[in-house]
Amino acid sequence: MAREPILKTWKLFIGGAFPRTESGRTMILWGGDDRVIAHCCQGSRKDLRNTVEVARKALPGWWARDAYNRSQILYRIAEMAEGRTAELVDAIRAVPDPDSDQPPTAAVARKEVAVAIDRMVTFAGWCDKFAQILGSRNPVNGPYHNFTMPEPTGVCGVIAPNQPTFLGLITHLAPILAGGNVAIALASETNPLPAMVFAEICATSDVPGGVVNILTGYRRELIPEFADHRDIDAIGGAAETTEERRLLELGAADNMKRVRLETVGDGDYFDDDARHSPWTIEPFTEMKTIWHPSGA
Amino acid sequence: MNSPTATPEWEYAPAPERFDPGIKDRYRLFIGGRFVASRGRKTFETINPATEAVLSRCDEANSEDVDAAVAAARAAFRKWSRTKPKERAKYLYRIARRIQERSRELAVLETMDGGKPIRESRDVDIPLVAQHFFHHAGWCDKLQYAFPGATDPRPIGVCAQVIPWNFPLLMLAWKIAPALACGNTVVLKPAETTPLTALRFAEICEECELPAGVVNILTGAGETGRHLVEHPDVDKVAFTGSTAVGKRIAASSAGTGKRLTLELGGKSPNIIFADASIDQAIEGIVQGIWFNQGHVCCAGSRLFVQESVLSEVIAKLERRLRTLRVGDPLDKNTDVGAINSGPQLATIQQYLTEGTAEGATMHQPSTQSLPDKGFWCQPCFLSDVQPNHVIAREEIFGPVLAVMSFRTPEEAISRANDTRFGLAAGVWTDKGSKIFEVASRLQAGIVWLNTYNRFDATSPFGGVKESGFGREGGLHGLRGYLSL
């Protein structure tokens, strides 16, 4: 007798745990043959608020960790992802691309996973290096020791593009984590499965709870909430439309969130040269300049 | 605590600076390399806040003037952005030299128009202005080395720049020098109470044969500024001023693709530990809050004193306050000049009323008489201030200090960070390990350790949280005027 598969209900990833959405709502993911692939949480405004609280609590610990330690934790994420490559490839291919109505080919999906994992390794390496590139010792007039160093901006929203589902998320998340920030990511709406597999990877790596948080849901519902939340310090990622960008920038004005968004289609996610630059970390850092008299 | 033995009253002979800066009756807008009248034919007076005498009339630029200035900057951008960097540098070096050569005139003009003591405009503002142009002149041909991996950084385009009245020419330098060094062109609006040094700077641009349209100066008030920052052909907005206006600019720029640098308000903490050199710290507090009448965005306006030295600090502050000379800004002995405008004085007085109404104790020990005319506020501080008091939370922008106490470093840090602002902070202790621990945990863009209110062209300046974003000065200041 044929065995019926066990369908998994994917939950949110908040504070290192996997809660259901407080709203009780789910969204259905449809496969290519009009079969239900999975149910995902339709995250709500309240979920985001809860997540911001958890992320805010996780920030000081992540910020204060030695860069070498952060570096090893990011590398551990890559190690764990490597072991789950097949699952990530399946997740990427589970839902057809809304534009082409076809799932990515296995070769394309494998390449996406490989580039994403390598990117995580690259940013693992940046953790204890970018401060030397972005910082400076300033030759001021007078007997002062004066230097500038980057510090984390804080709690960062990451609006992942709908495509590429996995690489898009990793590309925007990795620089933010390397910079010492904590992240609240909104997964691809059209296919959040790779992001949720990634959540399980984080949960089984050494990432402290609350440093990486991932929500699933509708962009039109959650983007305005990210924009308006007063305890989010910065927003990165990709806007699918100019209206999304406008909404995020408008909300950001109210508490001076730093916003660094690209518009989908602006850049190539597979371009290592552009994507691996330390200048992708810089928008999510704050330069602190310290003066001290010297010999006076 | 007993008051210290009476200090002998020293009489100072007046030592007025008598240089005549040659102010004209009327100034026009500087657009496309020429001084032209506003199309709207409206003018406004600029006065000396120490005497209320009218110094001159300036044109109030309207939306058509803004269109013309932005068009001039756009036209000039094509050439200026392609001018060989080492040639661009020569213009900036020339400007720096002319500022040095005309520094006395600029200092007097700054003091007359804005009310700040001549000692400060002469020894702080104008030298920093010259340094800023000189420093940035040298960046012109080095930009390809400034940002590792970005070997072809590009200018952004036309920059709209709006600056405040507290450091008129210095803020102009902070805005214009990096913009030009990076190959951008600018339209700058000085504050309506302090337009004169910006117009004098326009004359210096002419003298230095800076190509027409690279720098355009529009005088006017808030409405002029709004037209400028909302102009659709502007690529970058750089604003220094209040957080409220900064938020409006950020909101109106949403979705337009304009780049932003915002240097906004502050309520900066100055923390004194019991193991600090108290006498040095007292001088640092004075420098932190009574410099430039407290019209300083990074002023150390919240003083946190470790409980065991609170009474000592209060007594020494009172004694030091009595020695501050308040009065004629053109007198070389003056420490605290005039409040910049009548409305600003009214704002400060409102805060003082609220502060005492909420239960704070006022310390205004000076008995000096103030001039009859002009806008004056005796420097003062308030003790018994609670963290929820308005004077402990809002930016006053005047010579008013809120004094609070703390017991442990943890408490000092958490109370210092308990504000929506994050511009600057000061820490005073002779313990090296402690000072760096506290410095690294303070939420601020600039941290002064055992010093306060130091500025330099090579030192990045700017805030975190609602004090804005972007840096001005040094390598980091270039970032806001380039696309990598």
Image (spheres, coloured by chain):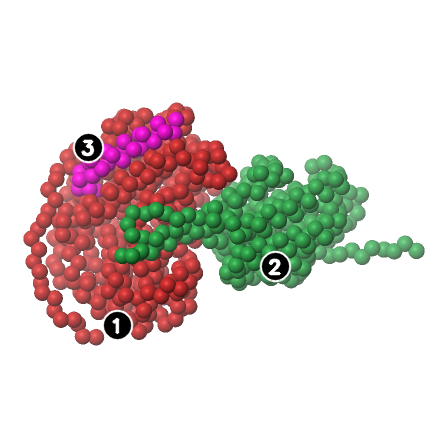
- Taking depth in this image into account, of B149 and A207 the one nearest to the observer is B149
Task: Kindly report the secondary structure that dominates the magenta region of the rendered protein.
Answer: helix
Image disc number at residue B311 = 1
Image disc number at residue A199 = none
Question: Label 2 marks which chain's residue?
Answer: A
Residue for badge 3: B26
Q: Which amino acid does label 1 sit on?
A: Ser
Q: Which of marks 1 and 3 is nearer the N terminus?
A: 3
Considering the numbered disc 3 on the image, is that residue within a helix, a strand or a loop? strand
**Quadrant housing the C terminus of chain A:** bottom left
For the point 25% across and 68% down, the residue is B313
Q: Which amino acid does label 3 sit on?
A: Arg
Q: Colour of chain A?
A: green
Task: Nearest to the eye among marks 1 and 2: give it.
Answer: 2
Considering the numbered disc 1 on the image, is that residue within a helix, a strand or a loop? helix
- Taking depth in this image into account, of A29 and A69 the one nearest to the observer is A69
**Crowdedness near tag 3: few (<14), some (14–19) or many (≥20) residues, C-alpha within 10 Å:** few
Residue for badge 2: A207
Quarter where residue B299 is shown? bottom left
Residue B217 forms part of the magenta stretch:
no
Task: Find the distance from the CA under tag 1 to the CA under tag 3.
Answer: 53 Å
For the point 8% across and 60% down, the residue is B10
* Direction from residue B436 to residue B98 in the image, left or right: left
Quarter where residue B269 is shown? bottom left
Task: Nearest to the eye among marks 1 and 3: give it.
Answer: 1
Considering the numbered disc 2 on the image, is that residue within a helix, a strand or a loop? loop
